[in-house]
Image: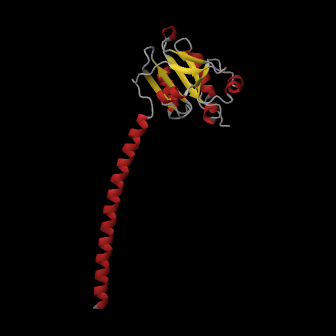
Amino acid sequence: MKKQLFLTVTAIAMSALLTGSVWINVLLARRLGQYKAANANLRAERVLQVGEAVSGMHVMDLQSKPLLIPHGIQGKPTLLYVFTPSCVWCVANLDNIKHLTSQKREEYNIIGLSLAAEGISRYVEEHHLDFPVYIAEKELATEYKLGGTPQTIVVSKAGKVEANWIGAYGNSLKPEIDKFFHVTLPGLGQLQ
């Protein structure tokens, strides 16, 4: 009898613990969903959105001379390629950006923008970049919400963002960029 009572009480206790555990998991899953939504909103705030207006670019040339580059030079939109000399993904993406810029130089003002000044002249020379390269000033990096590299931004003649991709042109981005620009890019090179 005592054994039977003990087993019944144990079964009730286990059932209560199981029910409590299920409810805790449901509440945690709901909370996780809320955190994911909040995180997605924060990311969206930290990335230029299509249609967002941006001003001309305050940059420094490779000799550290400050310049203002307006949008719509020669009546063309701007293709802005953002990188850093130390970024291995930027190096792996070089064949893609060189192919893209060679195919689209008649349609776009192509500008390379480094987030770091250190080593930029050597990088440009070593990798034979055939488009103008500048160094981003802090205000520009803040306004354009720059951070991850490589990043490719298309800005209309009127200064509105038409496209914005963060990352190398791998499996997920390459088809989007191919479609947007009507090109077929070679894909990623080897990581160094």
Q: Image point 63% across, 32% down: which residue?
A: 92
Above or below, comparing residue 157 to residue 43 in the picture: above
Q: Quadrant of residue 2?
A: bottom left
The N terminus - image quarter: bottom left
Q: Is residue 100 visible?
A: no
Q: Quadrant of residue 65?
A: top right
Q: Image point 36% across, 43% down: which residue?
A: 37
| Foreground pick, 30 / 11 | 30
| Foreground pick, 1 / 94 | 94
Task: Give the left or right position of residue 160, taking residue 6 as reference.
Answer: right
Q: How is the image coloured?
A: secondary structure
Above or below, comparing residue 39 to residue 144 in the picture: below
Q: Residue furthest bottom?
A: 1
Figure label count: 0
Q: Position of residue 123 (x, y in %)?
A: 69, 27
Task: Give the left or right position of residue 53, taking residue 113 as reference.
Answer: left
Q: Position of residue 100 (x, y in %)?
A: 57, 21
Q: Is residue 120 visible?
A: yes
Q: Position of residue 74 (x, y in %)?
A: 51, 8
| Foreground pick, 139 / 192 | 139
The C terminus - image quarter: top right
Q: Position of residue 45 (x, y in %)?
A: 41, 34
| Foreground pick, 30 / 175 | 30
Above or below, comparing residue 129 to residue 35 in the picture: above
